[in-house]
Amino acid sequence: MAANKGSEQQITPRAVDYARWYQDVVSQAGLAETSDVRGCMVIRPYGFALWENIQRVMDGMFKETGVENAYFPLFIPMSYLSREAEHVEGFAKECAVVTHHRLKAVDGKLAPDPESLLEEPLVVRPTSETIINATFAKWVQSHRDLPLLINQWCNVVRWEMRTRLFLRTTEFLWQEGHTAHATPDEAQERALLMLRVYRRFVEEWMAIPVITGVKTASERFAGAVNTYTMEAMMQDKRALQAGTSHNLGDNFARAFGTQYQSEGGKLTYVHQTSWGVSTRLIGALVMAHGDDRGLVLPPNLAPVQAVILPLFRKEQEAAAVREKAQEFRQRLAARGTAAKVDDRDTLSAGARFFWWEKRGVPLRIEIGPRDLKENQFVLVRRDTGEKSFHPQAALEETVARALEEMQRGLFDRARAFRDANTVRVETWSDFADAFRDENSAFVMARWCGDPMVEAQIKEETKATIRCVPFDNPRDDGPCVKSGRPASERVLFSKAY
Amino acid sequence: MAANKGSEQQITPRAVDYARWYQDVVSQAGLAETSDVRGCMVIRPYGFALWENIQRVMDGMFKETGVENAYFPLFIPMSYLSREAEHVEGFAKECAVVTHHRLKAVDGKLAPDPESLLEEPLVVRPTSETIINATFAKWVQSHRDLPLLINQWCNVVRWEMRTRLFLRTTEFLWQEGHTAHATPDEAQERALLMLRVYRRFVEEWMAIPVITGVKTASERFAGAVNTYTMEAMMQDKRALQAGTSHNLGDNFARAFGTQYQSEGGKLTYVHQTSWGVSTRLIGALVMAHGDDRGLVLPPNLAPVQAVILPLFRKEQEAAAVREKAQEFRQRLAARGTAAKVDDRDTLSAGARFFWWEKRGVPLRIEIGPRDLKENQFVLVRRDTGEKSFHPQAALEETVARALEEMQRGLFDRARAFRDANTVRVETWSDFADAFRDENSAFVMARWCGDPMVEAQIKEETKATIRCVPFDNPRDDGPCVKSGRPASERVLFSKAY
């Protein structure tokens, strides 16, 4: 419970300045802060505890599908990036390049030692398809070595000019899964399976509804055959791409010679997938559920699910109230609820309310001398602000039920918000209106399939095709921009 | 259970070539391999599963002492390294230096874009005292913000010329704890507390006995007031430094201005510690317990504690034997034992024995048609090779007892080996003999305290002072090298 210097500051209301509100919440909830290193963030303990919960749950879900963790080098030889023609276009641009391996004092000032110049520069991994294929090519010999189902949790670096905490930073943390299969069908199945895993996680644990679908060619991962995505609506009605899963076909296998000998003895390229989610999910969490009082955390992921505040005026009341608070904590812990007692006497009751409110703790439990007498306690829900009284004997069930209701409530609220802001648009003038100035929405409109038209729409409105949703019903009509015939609607939005 | 290409190869016996033996075990157990990137390793799934177990247990132990995890940037501005005078000497030498942030095609070949030259080069963290202090200086205002107890699990890079998997690699994984305290005493207590945590982990979980003590000035962490260490003996009688904990005093606080306002209102520099263990521990595990047949894992850390092999000759026996194997796995899993059934029909029984033996799995359980009839099973211990028969009804207790005995047995064996190879030496000629050619040992000898003498001993014998052990009894006599008076013995050894 280290002090947060922002703790006395106000949070800018969303309606006043949404971007400022986001920064304020991230800062005052103690999630992260900018560092002295351009574009790199410091993830503070509370933010990291959230990431640990995300990792723990997802890691278990990956392992259930047979995935194993491993670790591959941080550095990628520059030439590796060039091997896959599209990949180099996508990733060789903005990256951190290591050129020397020593510093030395020159005229009393430290500088890279010219004698330590590397023969081949190394790139700090922006993603690891290339370096991992260099290894997979050694691991895969026979059809018996397949499938290979590997994941790594690590840091990656993409040099970004404009950065925002969690949403876009030069260095970020993520997981990247990489699989190799004998057949195209198996790779396709795996790419879709992992998207389903992601969706289940984001909807059931983060309480964020998503639309899943396939990216258009222009939004596809550099080197992939197909990119599958899940798109979530934030409270400013913009889309956030919350995770992607790629069917890489045999593109990287051909570039790196990753081949297996089939049962018939024939050398065949493997078919591959890769899939990733990152600390960006924390940004999504903030923007999907937060309110003008700060963070609101879904109970399933909250590092602290219930904070217990012993409240009293007179010192002679303190002991009994504090004892009850500790008893509550133990009873809740025994049921697997992450509960914490806050009895700091350096902060007033009000200051402690605000402290936990900003941090989005789902439930606040208050106990005072009167509650002791009445054998009751006070329960306050973070999302609704609803305050209720309950018998102490029913503590465990009351808390469990409130957490469940809040988890469901957050999801329902986010889905209702998204549905209310999803529109079917037929004309270009309605389309342009939907994205005018700071406007955004999820717009379902027809598109003729021409990348030039897609680019033109983006230039004029800043809206991009987030995905062609799965299970899209056929819906013939004119393209919203070109008027040419189209057979289905795609999802447009401004995006993070 | 991906194929291991080394699986049919022999492991070089320790007596023939200890370094080769180590490489063979690491490779054939599927722990790690070299990558195409100079000095960087690929940690394979089985090696990573070990690291995950190490992380999980240690992370819990850290948190019990109040430590929280966070994450700090990978990159350190070059100038930060210079701020602490000794630190720059120790760490600015061999490191990866990022100088550019973009690649571009020049004459059709990729190269760092000259226009993307960074104003200030960035160093890939070799350790994070500097970048963390830049943040701590913001977090610490008042005495109420202390202590700060922070840890991060991450990758670090130290450019190494000669590398060996796990023991010395350019990139490695580790945890680094960083704490800030109001008083020198508190920092000293924390430094010692974390060394005790490390010791408990290494002795109770890894079954490796260690000698704890303080480093001499020449072996001290660059920038520390004192470095505490735990030293383990490997089977070639060399020492391996398994973890260190540093009392940094206020050296970094002064360099970065990390000050707090005391209750009296006075601005005071914090006192700090840092402490770390790395993937090197996996190298220690291999060298402490492995034998000529491969890895031997302490049960408490083994990803698979018991492998169950259904054995049969005739196909009509298969179903019953396999069913029993699955029943065993479930019964063991219910007791928290990590058990796995290996019924691959692509490998002979013998090949499967060797497979698990190389991987150091503590217990092998065999079940065949005759065992079914007799209501028994066969248990084979990896460390002793001991084979025994047990009633099926006693499966859980038998396995639990065997795992416990093996855990204790490994520790006892390692301690006996170390004690048998620890000698008290009085004369220089005996000292030189102890380290002649490939010889090594733990040599307790007197040293006069002169760093020049220490350096001379190292030059002549390659032996270094591993530590001045804690609770060292006073023992006056002449320095083993200089003959000058000394009052205690210190621990000398050749080291990894």
Image (cartoon, coloured by chain):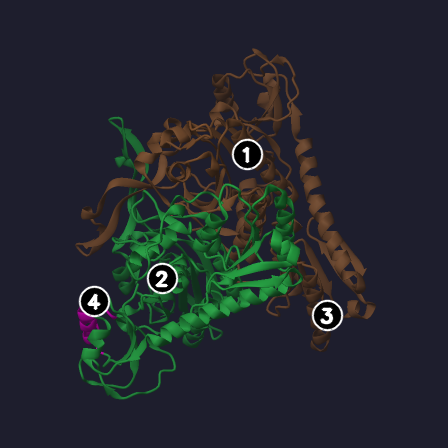
Chain colours: A green, B brown
The residue tagged 2 is: A256
Residue B176, magenta (yes or no): no
* Residue nearest the observer in this picture, B306 or B136: B136
Chain ID for label 3?
B
- Name the quadrant of the N terminus of chain B: bottom right
The residue tagged 4 is: A437
The answer to whether dots 4 and 3 both sit on one chain is no
> Label 3 is placed on what type of residue?
Lys
Which circle, 1 or 4, is nearer the viewer?
Answer: 4
Between marks 1 and 3, how big is the CA–CA gap? 51 Å
Dot label at residue B190: 1
Which circle, 2 or 4, is nearer the viewer?
Answer: 4
Chain ID for label 2?
A
On screen, residue A299 above or below B262: below
Image location of residue A308, percent across then percent down: 56, 53
The answer to whether dots 1 and 4 both sit on one chain is no
First along the sequence among labels 1 and 3: 1
Q: Residue at x 54, y 13 (%)?
A: B482
On screen, residue B46 above or below B311: above
| Category of crowding for the residue at label 3, using alpha-carbon neighbours closer than 10 angstroms: few (below 14), some (14–19), many (at least 20) | some
First along the sequence among labels 2 and 4: 2
> Label 1 is placed on what type of residue?
Arg
On screen, residue B193 above or below A270: above
Dot label at residue B324: 3
The answer to whether dots 2 and 4 both sit on one chain is yes
Question: Of helix, strand and loop, which one carries label 3?
Answer: helix
> Label 4 is placed on what type of residue?
Asp
Magenta part of the chain: A450-463
**Quarter residue B170 falls in:** top left
